[in-house]
Amino acid sequence: MRDSKRLISIFRSLSETRQQALLDYAEFLAGKEGAEIAAAPPSEPLPIPRPEQENVVKAIQRLMQTYPMLERNQIFHEASAQMTRHLVHGVAAAEAIDELERIFARQYQQYRDMLQKDLLSP
């Protein structure tokens, strides 16, 4: 409350041109903050259904869209391993995709646990 009174006092002491500049800057900051909030990834997975016919690459893309809050670098190694299992070792696409879904779900649970821990930490 005290800061708002101080801001009003400073605002009133400025010339009309500087008042307008201060208002423009305040609107810029407010818009930037709103854009940052809008750009933040959702905290819950998006409901993107698994198609009946899907290849492993498309599954990885779908899961990345489903879980935009996850750090891609953390998942990359495990997702690459599933791709290798499928392409090199002949594991069926459906089996590799099932494992990818488990990997993403596990990573999401770890993400939620980390958030919960951060919220409870002083």
Image: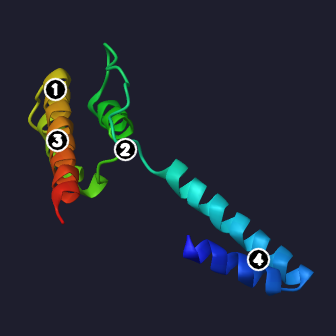
Q: Which residue is mark 3?
A: 109
Q: Secondary structure at mark 1?
A: helix
The answer for how far apart the CA atoms under marks 3 and 1 are is 17 Å
Percent from the top left, x then y, of residue 89? 8, 36
Where residue 101 sits, quadrant-wise, is top left
Q: Secondary structure at mark 2?
A: loop
The answer for how far apart the CA atoms under marks 3 and 4 are is 44 Å
The mark that comes first in sequence, 2 or 3, is: 2
Where residue 48 sits, quadrant-wise, is top left
Q: Is residue 13 left or right of residue 3?
A: right
Q: Which mark is residue 120?
A: none
Q: Which residue is mark 4?
A: 22
Residue 7 showing in the rendered view? yes
Task: Please report the residue visible at 30 percent of the width from the left and 31 percent of the height from the top.
Answer: 59
The answer for how far apart the CA atoms under marks 4 and 1 are is 55 Å
The answer for how far apart the CA atoms under marks 1 and 2 are is 19 Å
Q: Which residue is mark 1?
A: 98
The one nearer the camera, 40 or 85, is 40
Q: Secondary structure at mark 4?
A: helix
Nearer the observer: mark 2 or 3; the answer is 3
Type of the residue with mark 4: Leu
The answer for how far apart the CA atoms under marks 2 and 4 are is 36 Å
Task: Please report the residue visible at 42 percent of the width from the left and 47 percent of the height from the top.
Answer: 41
**Residue positioned most to the right:** 16
The one nearer the camera, 50 or 41, is 41
Q: Is residue 85 left or right of residue 20?
A: left
Q: Which residue is mark 2?
A: 68
Task: Please report the residue visible at 33 percent of the width from the left and 34 percent of the height from the top.
Answer: 45
Nearer the observer: mark 3 or 4; the answer is 4
Q: Are marks 3 and 1 in contact (CB under 8 Å)?
A: no
Type of the residue with mark 2: Pro
